[in-house]
Amino acid sequence: MSALRFPKIYAVVLLVFGLVFVFSGLVINFLQLCSLALWPLNKNLYRKVNCLLTYSFWSQLIVLLEWWSGSECNLFTDQNSVDKIGKEQAIVIFNHTFEIDVFCVWTLCERYGILGSSKVLAKKELLYVPVIGWVWYFQESIFCTRKWEEDKHGLVEDLSRLADYPEPLGFLLSCEGTRFTEEKHRISMEVAESKGLPKLKYHLLPRTKGFTTVVQCLRGKASAVYDVTLNFRGRQNPSLLGLVRREKYKADMCFRRIPLEEIPLDDNEIAKWLHELYQEKDALQEFYNQTGIFPGEQIKPRRRPWALFNFFFWATAILFSLFKLTFVIFLSGSPLLILIFFGFLGGALFGIQRLVGVTEIQKSSTYGNQEFKKRG
């Protein structure tokens, strides 16, 4: 559903939330730009400042997921693995299947205190998305063109800069390289058949080169790979607009901690290991579809109030400032200022619509279709 066809009450909610998210993001971007002055003086201080600023931005989506819609995120794992989250650096693998899957992984990061320090491996086009891409850039996330010959050197160089990162972090990547769609899956399985690889029912073939490089560059710094397999109860098909409508989703995540020393050293062996991991992930999804749960102990991480306090701060500051600005402009009676104001507001609304569109599956890129055809 387009945000423009929302019932009025939810359109207002989306407008308010979107304005707070966008304008707070612009302020955060400005503060991040100013923080660059710290880099040559004290790199660790720069990173701590940007951890706080990044948390202040992304935690607003946690508020939408947890506090507004009332959605729940449960873990199926063991207590020993949970006890290590937030106390080490880890490579986080997740299945990119749903519109809000990244939100759920971020919820896990937020509850264990690593949301601000977590990085992503994202397509380079997102770098040019105002606010979102800029937050990731200052946070030292890594962008790639998804053309291996162009990405390899830059990926190694960017990962090497994280070697002295002072905070526990999760480096998030989707090894499938793109969001799952039926068309991409069909083409991916044709490639699997042509290469003699086992077919997957619920995932695309993993892209092994990027994962291999990440493992090799972070070996000795990261302690483990966190494998997250996500699904939703009742075969729910969650969306960002559904969260705005207060639709309550129940996300289940099978969380497996794999010590990095258990992953092979050789490139080909790492690739083989990753393919086997995705066969296991496929089996976990099949188990979930048949039983409605993942194997392991069910753990519900405690919800923290800091994201909500942060959102109230930004909502108060942004909405009060916009109201005051609106009052001053209309009181001035200047047609030019009023026209500029409505143009500015229209640009913000267009930006909100575009940000919603980034999450929608039907608007996902055709990258996977083209890339898998080439690999075939």
Image (cartoon, helix red, strand yellow):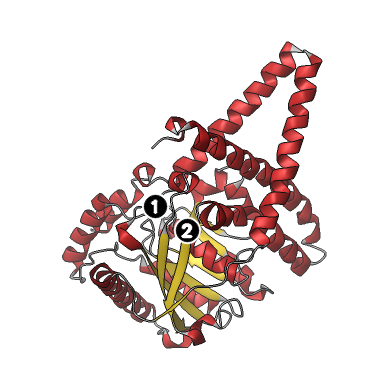
Residue 34 pos. (x, y %): 78, 51
Circle 2 residue: 71
In which quadrant is the N terminus drawn? Answer: top left
Q: Is residue 152 visible?
A: no
The mark nearer the N terminus, 1 or 2, is: 2
Task: Name which residue lies at 68% across and 63% down.
Answer: 51
Mark 2, residues whose alpha carbon is within 10 Å: few (<14), some, or many (≥20)?
some
Circle 1 residue: 238
Q: Is residue 158 visible?
A: yes
Mark 1 or 2: the one toward you: 2
Task: Name which residue lies at 50% across and 87% down.
Answer: 80
- Which structural element holds mark 2? loop
- Which structural element holds mark 1? loop
Q: Give the total number of marks visible in the rendering.
A: 2
Tell me whether circle 1 and circle 2 mark residues in contact (CB < 8 Å).
yes
Q: Is residue 328 above or below residue 132?
A: above
Q: Is residue 239 above or below residue 190?
A: above
Three-letter code for the amino acid on which mark 2 is drawn: Ser
Residue 71 pos. (x, y %): 47, 58
In which quadrant is the C terminus drawn? Answer: bottom left
Three-letter code for the amino acid on which mark 1 is drawn: Pro
Residue farthest along the right direction in this orientation: 41
In space, the residues marked 1 and 2 are separated at their CA atoms by 10 Å
Q: Quadrant of residue 280?
A: bottom left
Task: Name which residue lies at 71% across and 17% down.
Answer: 338
Q: Quadrant of residue 304?
A: bottom right
Residue 319 pos. (x, y %): 71, 38
Residue placed most toward the observer, 143 or 154: 143
